[in-house]
Amino acid sequence: MRILHAATAAAVLAAAAGIATAAAAATTTATPPPVSITPAGTADGYQFLDQMMDKYATGSTTRLVQSYIADSAMGAFTDSVTYDDALVVDALLARGTADDIARARVIGNALLYVQANDAKHDGRVRAAYAPTPLTAPSKVSATDDTSDVGNMAWVGQALVQLYARTGDAAYLTGATSVATWIQTNTYETNGPGGYSGGSDSSGKLTWKSTEHNLDVYSLFTMLATQTGDSAWTTRAAHAKSFVDAMWDATGKKYWVGTDPDGTTLNKGFLPEDVNTWTYLAFKDPTHAVSIDWDVANLAVTDGSFTGVSFGACDKTKVWFEGTAHLADALAVRNGGGDAAKAQSYLNSIQLAQTTAPHNNGLGIVAASRDKLSDCDSDYYYAALHTGATSWYLLAGTAANPFYLLPNPTSGDDFSLTAGPASATVGAGSAASATISTALTAGSAETVTLSASGLPNGVTATFSPASVTAGGSASLSIATGSSTPPGTYPIAITGTAPSATHSTTFTLTVTGTTTTPTLYEAESSANIRSGTANVIACSACSGGDRVGHIGKQSTGVGTLTFTGITANGGAGAYQIVVAFTDGSASRNAQISVNGGSPQTVTFGTTGSFSTPGDQTVTLTLAAGTNTISFTDSSASAPDIDAITVPATHN
């Protein structure tokens, strides 16, 4: 039975039963506030979490929480999975009673305890532990010693949530130690960059997961907000750039990640969580259609239950945790029809609470029946699960664990947005935006505005510096002449007595580059898929070229240049393509950032060992871009390099 949460690139396939959705619901430019649709079974769900927490000890005794009540088919399984522990903390903080906070602190203290008493003493935590009360260091027993990035990031997020709610610096210190381990041990620059999988007893996990990277983005962004250290904002952007590279513009969904080489796209799994969690983490309206892809393509019905299967290989049973992911994402997006869809999923989960096999009327079972395949040789069972129950509770109030959770006990809350949400300026220039707040609950409080993650030489000024919820302020961001070119996600935070919220303003600074930039096709930063491969070429600029692009007898090859910088800002660029073509002529389908391709005809260069140049007009976005070469119907020319000018037309 797999207990790591997406510890491999295998992930979840999810859908809603019988519901077709128009993509237009996800492309609105203004995001409405989340809708709360608290199901009737909420109190029972919290009672289940309390019972699981008190299974081996009560009160303030430091302890983790057993994840499952295993049924006979599942066998003897009593582990406490740290991802599930983090979810229980989030669910308790989302309701936020005095007892909930006390219980969340006990679990947080237990996470700090296993971290402090790890044999490596380097800030890591493990995937799972025995739920034995932690009364002495000898009681720390890792039942799965894998340190995978996804689980660790969720633990770090939960610790930051506890710090934000309680002010106890120990939680922030623990979260920072987790994040530092991730940064030190899994930061990668090959292919699309990002962070690799972590480590297990066999060594480093070199594949990269989309879900892990968005978990890291959330943790690092929370740390930037709570510590004021802009380094975490830069690191969060590194994780986000990987997730952005996984966007499938044709399919309107995200790929699961890469193979162990860290570069080749893994297209063997089409997971639910990368499509819903990416929206929860980024709340990007331009990619919100990924939620609709899950709804439209991955529907499952099992008897009276509708929702999510864990994978396309087994669509005979419902995975209730994933159904709650989807309900939460829909409730947070809250576009046309989203609330009704979310309610239908929660109704199905609530039905399972009292009628699913092995139910106890309180918790949520993992699967609608035993042996739901994860498409990777393991199974989920109709066994009561703290993780599924926690997501059910979070989804009922549209609580988003990828952001700092508001304090619900005060009854006062607000939302925060930036308009526009991005700007591109030259070094030494300034950008401006309007920061708007809206009252979403209770009475209007004073909201103090701040900015973190500012690059060197950049200042942010708010006028006024604080507003009453419902008001707005002008933001002016001034860059210096020495500000390094690049794209910087700046966290804009509004702090009120009862809640704290953040939004992201993306600042792209262009430099004073006057010379073109050469990008070699064979660079390890690029993505080669299908039949595309590196071929020696002594006359080519870097000594190699990439060939077998386009349709071949054994498949279709694609070369994708990554990290292509538009130094002059967004616009149409005259890009010089160095290529070789020993035939009369060949076409290439060229696309930018996964958009619609344009077909370009390349003439002959005389041989595949002799490079030639052809200029192509391509429209680049501000910041970094991807440029892909392929041809679905015939062979394309071999590519040596591309040269991007410093300015656009």
Image (cartoon, rainbow, N blue to C red):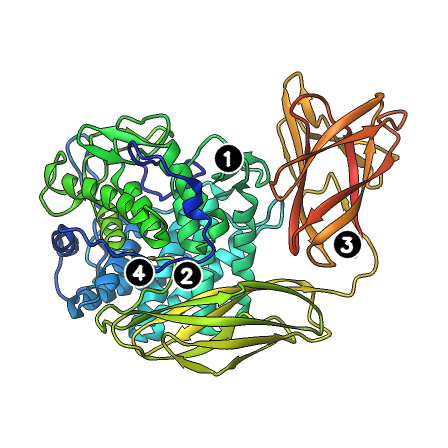
Give, as a three-letter code, the residue at label 2: His
Which quadrant of the rendered structure holds the N terminus?
A: top left
Q: Earlier in the sequence, mark 3 or mark 1?
A: 1
* Cα gap from disc 3 to disc 1, whole angstroms: 30 Å
Mark closer to the chain start, 2 or 1: 2
Query: Which tag, 4 or 2, sits closer to the chain's start?
Result: 4
For disc 4, the neighbor class at 10 Å (few under 14, some 14 to 19, many from 20) is: many
**Residue at numbered disc 4:** 111
Label 1 sits on what residue type? Gly
Q: Nearer the viewer, residue 468 or 158?
A: 468
Q: Is residue 276 above or below residue 265?
A: below
Measure how far apart labels 1 and 4 are at the Cα level: 39 Å
Q: Given contact means CB atoms under 8 Å apart, are the residues at marks 3 and 1 in contact?
A: no
Mark 4, secondary structure of its residue: helix
Q: Position of residue 50 (x, y in %)?
A: 14, 56
The kind of residue on which mark 3 rests is: His
The residue pinned by badge 2 equals 121
Q: Helix, strand, or loop for circle 1? A: loop
Badge 3 element? loop
Tell me the residue at 41%/61% (across/down). Answer: 121
